Image (cartoon, rainbow, N blue to C red):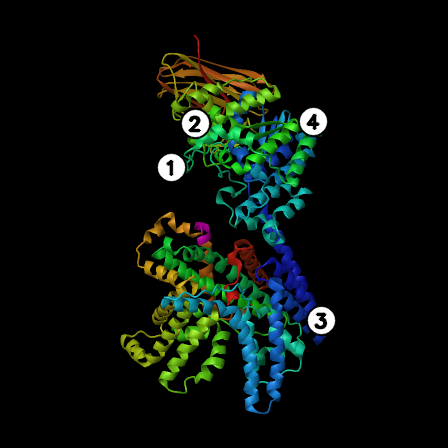
């Protein structure tokens, strides 16, 4: 009998060990996991920390906001996250002073984040994905009790088990893949959703304009409806802890179509608004600015979430709100308002110097030939040759230019302590081009030359700020469309073929959002 | 308490350890079994424990009285008391609403509207199983095939024995009851094979049955949305669902009992490899088939009263069997289909053999086996439509839609709109293939013995594989699909 018990125990131990090992290869929600890990490991200070649910991820165009306000954002939101979990993530985060944002903690707030029960399985699974990230926290157990019964035990116990269950497939991924959402932002925002409301959805919400018009008034006229005691408790907990720790707290309700229609939640919206007001917490409900932002059915992926166009439209309003609330100067004005006005005429396949900023924001969409890219943080991307034997470079799409004018391309790169070289090219119709190669260890221009009908090639390199250099190349151009190419190269490569095969699989770190392509005067 | 629940995963190891701690003291051990069994049943609804206790008490007392009664008339009277009480419970809880509905419908045919409403009656889980088990005890005593027990504790434990309480196998007192009188020694191999059976049962239930149920429920609950191959696919999947669901329960029951030194009868023997419906019923729900044979078919006269009476008896047995499964016209039709085919097989046996011999379709050759198995499986599947459909109309809607040509779904994503995505369908298909292969191999070579003779490392790899397949690919949680189908009967 003893033999049986010993063997059984051994079998259980082996099972648990194998499960835990396989768990380490699988995570539910890479966006959250990746960012929590990044934030905790790097202890790199950031300006904004965003908390909340899918609305946080899909509404705020952080690259735009950051490039405009010269800030750094990180998103700790996860899909369908209940506010109790948001509170727990906050609790974990608040324990570590190093992680406090320089400017503000931004939390998405809607009444449905406080819903007590949701019987649907996927909802529980999504809470688990956030819960996984609290495994070392005291909040882990209190949340388990809140969301799951002991009958969910095997699933709570192991991510591997959950991975093979009925979790919505788009949420599930292994740690070595980043394919869940297209155009994922390195800091956890999901900004590349192109799909729009379908015909029947549009039909269903046909009379939306009256809801948009009456939203603010309806809330004002509705009687306040309190959230549950526990919901108020966690909300006040966040507010009070932020006050005591000196963290600027901002609550935001992003625009959503559902919010306009759910009159049953108006009372709670009013309650939230009043509660935050009485506690002197900054808050904006962008549903009140629906019309001003210019949102239409084309800007939504579904009734709750903005799509790519929607979050682009919202971005300048976010910038204005944050700049005003936090008294930040809008340092790098990329004409956000005009971008919204120009919305209808913008063609994403053709880039000109006016909309280049938008294209730059979508580094993930840049052409990549023989290159493996990896975001190191929200600014820096390491681009590395994936083979020695073939050409390697990244390139923009076609940019419309005026023939015969001088254009300059510049890109910031990280100063290297080892030998590292970067090639930069403005390319017209082959062989028209200007090539420059820069030594980014010694801050030298190794060479510059024009070919074909390009003339007057010049290049220079300068230190921008600590560890960051700016590489510039300019030339009088020929043709109507140009591309900018850049990539790691070697000292052994000849200037006109810096992108060709090389002796090592070298890498350089660039700041893609810093790419500037502009017409310069003679 | 469900076998595939966390509750049972906690309950059973505790009972197992306590059982072997108390195994030297027969009374303590049986008290533990009784308490554990009542806890197991009461976990669902403790109020219905009273039914089991009453049923046990009546048969314990009546059994003794029948044995002591001297006149046949008194014995018969006492047997009738037992039958009335036991079947009374069964009829009240299971068939009251069926008869009320039937009356209403019958009167409606003549244009009269009866103002009766169906009663709000909860069907106690497993009532058909333990009622049949206790009835067999009393009937066997009446037939002088069994002596009544004086050991009330053993008898109550026998009736409520938790591994087989709610879904069988329906044990005979002559086989199971004596096992409560003797002490069991811890037998490592029995315990090991018991747990292996539990593991195999969980694989069938959680990996196959509960996964197939998703497609089956989708199609059978929305018959108007599906046609052609979708209906055929759902019906075939239901065939595997019900087999894996029910045989899994039996496997777990037999396995759990075996770990405690008890031997329960075999309930399934690869039924889908049967070459006729007659053979199918020798392999499907064996404990029920033999119960009906011994307590209905034979008392009706069996095959000893002429050809036509035999056919009639067979047909009656299957119609009754259908009604045992559920109080609905669909179950009745299901039973009738099987009864009709069995009668047909019996009536045409000689003629069919002649024809098959002439055309060389021999059942001992692979091609013949395959042909007859496929035919049998098709008939079984057709009957399953009535068994699974929530109503006669639904069954007819589904059957009428079968001829639709929509094979295109195999080349589009529509196949994945039945509830399982590509990944889940692949798992289900592989699991069914694995099951069939294991059954084929097991028929030639006992897999448990085969495994026992293998290297330690290989054996452990098999154990770990079973555990991982269940916990990783199993469908579990609190939902409709995790219930065992036969709980409702």
Residue at the spot of label 2:
A500
Q: Magenta stretch containing residue A378, yes or no? A: no
The answer to whether marks 2 and 4 sit on the same chain is yes
Residue at the spot of label 3:
B22
Quadrant holding the N terminus of chain A:
bottom right
Q: In the current view of this chain or complex, which residue is farthest to the left?
A: B358
Quadrant holding the C terminus of chain A:
top left
Q: In the current view of this chain or complex, which residue is farthest to the bottom?
A: B71
Chain ID, mark 2: A
Chain ID, mark 3: B
Label whose residue precedes the other's in the sequence (2 or 4): 4
Mark 4: few, some, or many residues within 10 Å (few <14, many ≥20)? few
Q: SS at mark 3?
A: loop
Whether tag 4 and tag 3 are in contact, CB under 8 A, the answer is: no
Label whose residue precedes the other's in the sequence (1 or 2): 1
Overall secondary structure of the magenta stretch? Answer: helix
User: Magenta residues, as a range?
Assistant: B420-425
Q: CA distance from mark 2 to mark 3?
A: 80 Å
Q: Position of residue B48 (x, y in %)?
A: 60, 67
Q: Position of residue A273 (x, y in %)?
A: 60, 30
Foreground disc of the pair 1, 2: 1
Residue at the spot of label 1:
A199
Near-viewer residue (A2 or B272): B272
Q: Position of residue B98 (x, y in %)?
A: 46, 68
Q: SS at mark 2?
A: loop
Foreground disc of the pair 4, 1: 1
Q: Could you say which disc has been placed on residue B70 in the image?
A: none
Q: CA distance from mark 2 to mark 4?
A: 53 Å
Q: Could you say which disc has been placed on residue A246 in the image?
A: 4
Q: Magenta stretch containing residue B422, yes or no? A: yes
């Amino acid at each position: 009998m003893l033999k049986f018990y010993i063997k059984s125990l051994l079998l259980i131990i082996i099972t648990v060990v194998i499960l835990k090992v396989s768990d380490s290869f699988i995570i539910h929600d890479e966006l959250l996991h990746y960012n929590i890990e990044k934030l905790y490991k790097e202890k790199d200070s950031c300006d904004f920390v965003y908390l909340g649910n899918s609305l946080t991820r899909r509404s705020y165009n952080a690259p735009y906001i950051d490039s405009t306000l010269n800030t750094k954002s990180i998103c700790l939101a996860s899909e369908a996250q209940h506010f109790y979990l948001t509170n727990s993530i906050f609790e974990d985060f608040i324990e570590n002073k190093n992680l406090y944002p320089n400017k503000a903690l931004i939390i998405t707030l809607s009444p449905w984040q406080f819903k007590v029960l949701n019987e649907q399985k996927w909802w529980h699974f999504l809470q688990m994905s956030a819960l996984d990230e609290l495994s070392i926290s005291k909040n882990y157990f209190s949340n388990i009790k809140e969301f799951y019964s002991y009958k969910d035990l095997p699933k709570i116990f192991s991510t591997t088990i959950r991975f093979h269950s009925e979790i919505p497939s788009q949420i599930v991924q292994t740690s070595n893949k980043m394919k869940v959402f297209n155009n994922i932002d390195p800091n956890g925002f999901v900004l590349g959703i192109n799909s729009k409301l379908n015909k029947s959805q549009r039909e269903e919400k046909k009379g939306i304009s009256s809801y948009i018009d009456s939203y603010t008034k309806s809330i004002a006229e509705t009687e306040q409806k309190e959230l549950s005691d526990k919901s108020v408790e966690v909300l006040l907990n966040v507010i009070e802890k932020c006050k005591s720790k000196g963290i600027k707290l901002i609550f935001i309700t992003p625009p959503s179509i559902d919010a306009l229609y759910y009159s049953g939640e108006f009372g709670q919206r009013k309650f939230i608004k009043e509660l935050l007001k009485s506690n002197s917490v900054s808050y904006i409900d962008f549903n009140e600015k629906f019309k001003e932002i210019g949102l239409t059915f084309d800007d939504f992926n579904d009734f709750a979430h903005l799509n790519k166009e929607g979050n682009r439209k919202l971005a300048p309003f976010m910038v204005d709100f944050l700049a005003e609330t936090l008294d930040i100067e809008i340092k790098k004005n990329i004409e956000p308002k005009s971008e919204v006005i120009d919305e209808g005429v913008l063609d994403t396949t053709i880039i000109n110097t006016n909309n280049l900023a938008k294209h730059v924001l979508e580094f993930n969409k840049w052409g990549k030939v023989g290159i493996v890219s990896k975001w190191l943080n929200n600014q820096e991307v390491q681009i590395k040759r994936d083979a020695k034997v073939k050409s390697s470079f990244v390139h923009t799409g076609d940019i419309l230019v005026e023939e015969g004018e001088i254009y300059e391309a510049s890109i910031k790169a990280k100063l290297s302590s080892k030998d590292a070289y970067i090639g930069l090219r403005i390319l017209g119709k082959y062989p028209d081009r200007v090539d420059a190669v820069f030594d980014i260890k010694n801050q030298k221009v190794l060479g510059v030359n024009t070919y074909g009908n390009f003339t007057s090639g010049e290049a220079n390199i300068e230190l921008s700020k600590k560890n960051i250099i700016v590489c510039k190349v300019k030339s009088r151009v020929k043709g109507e469309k140009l591309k900018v190419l850049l990539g790691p190269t070697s000292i052994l490569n000849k200037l006109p073929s810096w992108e060709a095969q090389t002796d090592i699989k070298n890498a350089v770190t660039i700041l893609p959002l810093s790419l500037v392509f502009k017409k310069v005067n003679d | 308490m469900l076998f595939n629940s966390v509750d049972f995963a906690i309950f059973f190891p505790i009972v197992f350890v306590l059982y072997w701690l108390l195994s030297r003291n027969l009374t303590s051990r049986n008290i533990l079994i009784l308490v554990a069994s009542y806890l197991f049943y009461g976990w669902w609804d403790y109020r219905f424990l009273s039914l089991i206790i009453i049923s046990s008490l009546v048969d314990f007392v009546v059994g003794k009285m029948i044995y002591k009664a001297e006149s046949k008339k008194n014995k018969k009277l006492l047997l009738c008391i037992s039958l009335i009480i036991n079947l009374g419970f069964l009829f009240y809880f299971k068939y009251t609403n069926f008869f009320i509905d039937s009356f209403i419908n019958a009167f409606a045919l003549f244009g009269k509207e009866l103002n009766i409403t169906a009663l709000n009656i909860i069907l106690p889980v497993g009532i058909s199983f333990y009622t049949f088990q206790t009835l067999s005890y009393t009937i066997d005593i009446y037939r002088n095939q069994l002596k009544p027990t004086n050991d009330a504790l053993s008898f109550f434990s026998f009736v409520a024995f938790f591994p087989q309480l709610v879904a069988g196998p329906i044990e005979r007192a002559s086989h199971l009851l004596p096992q409560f009188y003797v002490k069991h020694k811890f037998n490592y191999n029995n315990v090991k094979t018991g747990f292996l059976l539990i593991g195999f049962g969980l694989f069938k239930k959680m990996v196959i049955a509960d996964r197939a149920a998703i497609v089956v429920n989708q199609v059978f609950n929305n018959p108007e949305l599906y046609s052609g191959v979708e209906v055929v696919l759902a019906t075939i999947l239901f065939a595997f669902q019900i087999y894996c669901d029910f045989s899994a329960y039996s496997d777990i029951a037999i396995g759990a009992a075996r770990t405690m030194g008890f031997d329960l009868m075999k309930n399934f023997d690869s039924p889908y490899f049967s070459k006729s419906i007659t053979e199918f019923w020798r392999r499907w729900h064996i404990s029920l088939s033999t119960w009906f044979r011994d307590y209905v078919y034979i008392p009706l006269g069996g095959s000893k009263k002429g050809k036509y009476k035999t056919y009639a008896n067979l047909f009656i047995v299957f119609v009754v069997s259908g009604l045992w499964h559920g109080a609905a016209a669909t179950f009745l039709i299901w039973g009738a289909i099987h009864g009709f085919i069995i009668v047909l097989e019996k009536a045409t046996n000689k003629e069919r053999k002649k024809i098959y011999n002439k055309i060389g379709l021999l059942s001992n050759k692979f091609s013949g086996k395959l042909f007859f198995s496929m035919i049998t499986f098709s008939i079984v599947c057709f009957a399953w439509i009535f068994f699974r459909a929530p109503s006669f109309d639904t069954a007819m809607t589904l059957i009428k839609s079968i001829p639709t040509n929509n094979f295109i779904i195999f080349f589009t994503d529509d196949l994945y709109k039945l509830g399982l995505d590509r990944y889940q369908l692949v798992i289900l298909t592989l699991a069914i293939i694995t099951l069939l292969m294991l059954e084929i191999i097991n028929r030639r070579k006992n897999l448990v013995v085969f495994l026992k003779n293998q290297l330690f490392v290989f054996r452990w790899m098999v154990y770990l594989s079973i555990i991982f397949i269940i916990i990783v690919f199993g469908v579990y949680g609190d939902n409709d699909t995790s219930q065992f189908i036969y709980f409702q009967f």
